[in-house]
Amino acid sequence: NAGVTQTPKFRILKIGQSMTLQCTQDMNHNYMYWYRQDPGMGLKLIYYSVGAGITDKGEVPNGYNVSRSTTEDFPLRLELAAPSQTSVYFCASSQTGRDTEAFFGQGTRLTVV
Amino acid sequence: ILNVEQSPQSLHVQEGDSTNFTCSFPSSNFYALHWYRWETAKSPEALFVMTLNGDEKKKGRISATLNTKEGYSYLYIKGSQPEDSATYLCALPYSSASKIIFGSGTRLSIRP
């Protein structure tokens, strides 16, 4: 059972570069989420999606973009990387977004230098 | 945006002792409350999903209660063991249950 798969696991970016963090799930979940782990702050929601073709901003969307062309995939795009985007990024999915748990990927550790 | 508060921020407990911590949230527009356990260098994993006022959930030595009218949930760990060391997160669905917003977590360390 693959669950939620994120790639890459680690990446170093230079300031101003762009990259896409990949996330795919095989549980046929409609709801998908991107979070970043800020020290002492837990998880902050970047973007979320309630189904293919539908995305919306979370708590900290600036500097990021997402798309949801299929139920399975929810890539996160960083444009013009900045040191403030150094973080661990987690993708998650949920069946109902409410009364069922979220399942998380293994995380992507991104460093911007 | 929804304000989910957890206390204390960190906790150091002797092995064998019992402990508890709190998640507070606005009582209006409640949909559900999730508890997650997050070990260092791993991903968060769900412990409980609670939906009804007065809900009580139990998994082994860990249990949780929910009071939606006053806006809080307690997580209890009985007879703490070293493997209980982790950050415990609570989270609530918000905005028609579309967004899941997390608290900042309680970091639990168990002293042998």
Image (tube, grey):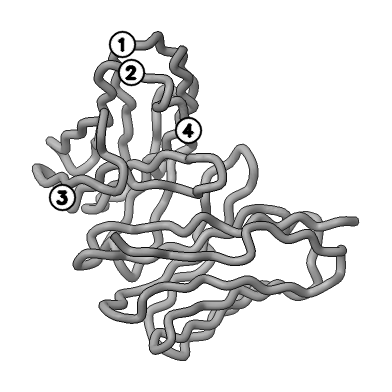
Precedes in sequence: disc 3 or disc 4: 3
Precedes in sequence: disc 4 or disc 2: 2
Q: What separation in Å lies between label 3 and label 1 (alpha carbons)?
A: 31 Å
What mark, if any, has residue A16 been given in the picture? Answer: 1
- B52 vs A111, left or right, is left
Precedes in sequence: disc 3 or disc 1: 1
Badge nearest the viewer, 4 or 2:
2
Which amino acid type is shown beneath numbered disc 3?
Gly
Asked if the residue under mark 2 is in contact with the one under mark 4, i.e. CB atoms within 8 Å, the reply is no
Q: Residues within 10 Å of mark 2 (few under 14, many from 20)?
A: many
- The numbered mark 4 sits on a residue in which chain? A
Task: State the SS at label 4.
Answer: strand
| Residue A61: quarter of image | top left
Q: Is residue A83 above or below residue B19?
A: above
Residue drawn at (48%, 82%) of the image: B66
> Which residue position holds label 4?
A88
Task: State the SS at label 3.
Answer: strand
Q: Are marks 4 and 2 on the same chain?
A: yes
In the rendering, at what x and y percent does residue B76 appear?
A: 66, 75
> Which residue position holds label 2?
A81
Q: How many marks?
A: 4
> Which residue position holds label 3?
A51
Residue drawn at (41%, 12%) of the image: A13
